Image (cartoon, grey):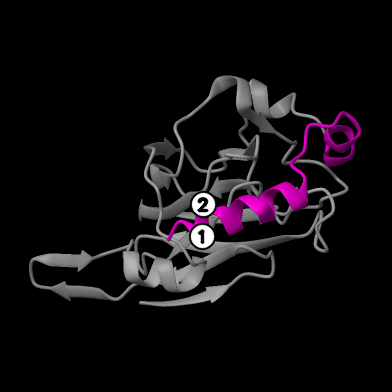
């Protein structure tokens, strides 16, 4: 499996090979050897998540207190979505920058989002399924979000789609507000945690 680094450091896109035949298709969206080669350590599995979303649904931009944070390995087994990674780490050279990847059930590409980065997506069609492997279990008190509609971020949500958001995501602070309140991860803390994970490899 091939991979590439996204423009947001510590985020990666993976390209698994699909094997179609007259029965259907077989694909392995997560492969540990490729993951280790890209990230430098194995993926600890603390929880797996599955969501189904109608067209226009935006989930995110979410992140967790780091350390330990919550690394996420994401793919789309049905439908299609635009996946967004945002650098929320205060002190990062790319703070506030973002990158996107289209995930769908045609190519089965996957994205890894390291601890401390923000993650979100928009469903491009009805009944879009997102599956993601998380390095840590969900911790309500340690989970946060910033507004996916923050005009300062100017995320590239398709103009033809009417955004559908949860009340929690609608009420989320802007990036500037989250930074002022001390809510965001600190880049040095995140890098130290990545180094710790690699040293345990």
Tell me the number on the disc at residue 199. 1
First in residue order: circle 2 vs circle 1: 2
Q: Nearer the viewer, residue 10 or 111?
A: 10
Q: Which residue is identified by label 2?
A: 124
Above or below: residue 51 compared with residue 107: above
Above or below: residue 114 compared with residue 127: below
Above or below: residue 8 compared with residue 71: below
Does residue 128 show up? yes
Q: Secondary structure at mark 2?
A: loop
Query: How many numbered marks are there?
Result: 2
In-image side of 179 versus 163 (left or right)? right
- Magenta stretch, main secondary structure, is helix
Q: Is residue 182 magenta?
A: yes
In-image side of 109 versus 30 (left or right)? right
* Mark 2 and mark 1 residues within 8 Å of each other at the beta carbon: no
In-image side of 171 versus 181 (left or right)? left
Q: Quadrant of residue 2?
A: bottom left
Mark 2–mark 1 Cα distance, whole angstroms, equals: 39 Å
Q: Quadrant of residue 146?
A: top right
Q: Is residue 82 magenta?
A: no
| Residue displayed at 26% across by 64% down | 28
| Residue displayed at 86% across by 45% down | 151
Q: Nearer the viewer, residue 195 or 84?
A: 195
| Residue displayed at 53% across by 25% down | 139
Q: Residues within 10 Å of mark 1 (few under 14, many from 20)?
A: few
Above or below: residue 110 compared with residue 169: below
Q: Secondary structure at mark 1?
A: helix
Q: x, y (%) of residue 73?
A: 45, 53
Q: x, y (%) of residue 156?
A: 71, 57
Quadrant location of the N terminus? Answer: bottom left
Q: Which residues are magenta?
A: 174-201
């Amino acid at each position: 499996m091939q991979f590439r680094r996204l423009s947001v450091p510590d985020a990666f896109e993976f390209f698994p090979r699909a094997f179609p035949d007259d029965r259907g298709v077989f694909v392995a969206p997560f492969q540990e050897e490729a993951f280790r080669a890209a990230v430098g350590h194995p993926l600890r599995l603390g929880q797996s998540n599955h969501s189904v979303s109608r067209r226009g649904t935006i989930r995110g931009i979410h992140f967790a207190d780091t350390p330990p944070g919550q690394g996420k390995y994401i793919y789309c087994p049905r439908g299609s979505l635009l996946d967004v990674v945002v650098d929320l780490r205060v002190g990062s050279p790319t703070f506030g920058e973002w990158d996107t990847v289209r995930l769908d059930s045609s190519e089965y590409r996957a994205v890894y989002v390291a601890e401390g980065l923000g993650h979100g997506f928009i469903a491009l069609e009805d009944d879009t399924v997102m599956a993601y492997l998380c390095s840590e279990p969900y911790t309500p008190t340690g989970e946060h979000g910033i507004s996916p509609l923050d005009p300062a971020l100017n995320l590239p949500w398709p103009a033809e789609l009417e955004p559908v958001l949860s009340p929690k995501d609608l009420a989320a602070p802007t990036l500037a507000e989250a930074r002022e309140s001390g809510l965001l991860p600190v880049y040095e803390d995140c890098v130290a945690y990545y180094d710790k994970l690699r040293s345990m490899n």
